[in-house]
Amino acid sequence: MNRCECPTEESLGCVTNHSAMAARNYLTRQLSIHGIDMTIEQFKVMVVLWKEGISTQQNIADFVGKDKTSVTRLIAGLEKRSLIQRTTACEDKRCNHVTLTPQGIALEKPTMEVLQEATQYIHREIDPHELAITLRVLKQMCQTLNYSKTSSKESE
């Protein structure tokens, strides 16, 4: 069976999962080919910092969708490579602020160029109108599922 075929052919969850895995693997290969030694999880952490400049570990965990312990490991790996640094917040010693180092800042442009090229390659044979519909539907699905996480407790 082909990786993109699902036992339940019309399962949106199965197809989106396989698509996401294939895109993730492709992006990982492209980063490696371009000499950027970064996992997708580390990339997500860096994206938060490239957008925000400074963030808390909790904010990063929320964005990446991982627990705080996993994010702490990701941050430690990036810190070890001198891409980010952690400082304790003066107002709350339990809170760490995470910021980019000059090396982390310098990595933004080449990394985002690889992402843009990879995205163009992935979308190259998809009709732009169909892509727009697909993105809208998937965003709606995310909103529905994220809403139902919070509302399911209310309905119990």
Image (cartoon, rainbow, N blue to C red):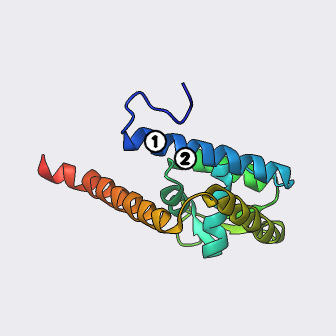
Residue at the farthest right position: 35
Work out whether residue 88 can be spotted: no
Q: From the viewer's perspective, is 11 left or right of 132? A: left
Quadrant for the N terminus in the image = top right
Q: Is residue 66 visible?
A: yes
Question: Amino acid type of disc 1?
Answer: Val
What is the x, y in percent for residue 9?
39, 34
Per the image, label 2 sits on a secondary structure element best described as helix
Above or below: residue 80 compared with residue 115: above
Q: Which mark is residue 20?
A: 2
Question: How far apart in space, not on screen, are marks 2 and 1 (Cα)?
Answer: 9 Å
Give the quarter of the image for residue 107: bottom right
How many other residues sit within 10 Å of disc 1, few (<14), some (14-19) or many (≥20)?
Answer: some
Residue 72, position as x, y percentages in the image: 61, 49
Residue at image position (28%, 51%) is: 149
Front in this rendered view, residue 138 or 88: 138
Q: Is residue 128 above or below residue 65?
A: below
Residue at the spot of label 1: 15
Q: Residue at x 43, y 38 (%)?
A: 14
Q: Nearer the viewer, residue 78 or 65?
A: 65
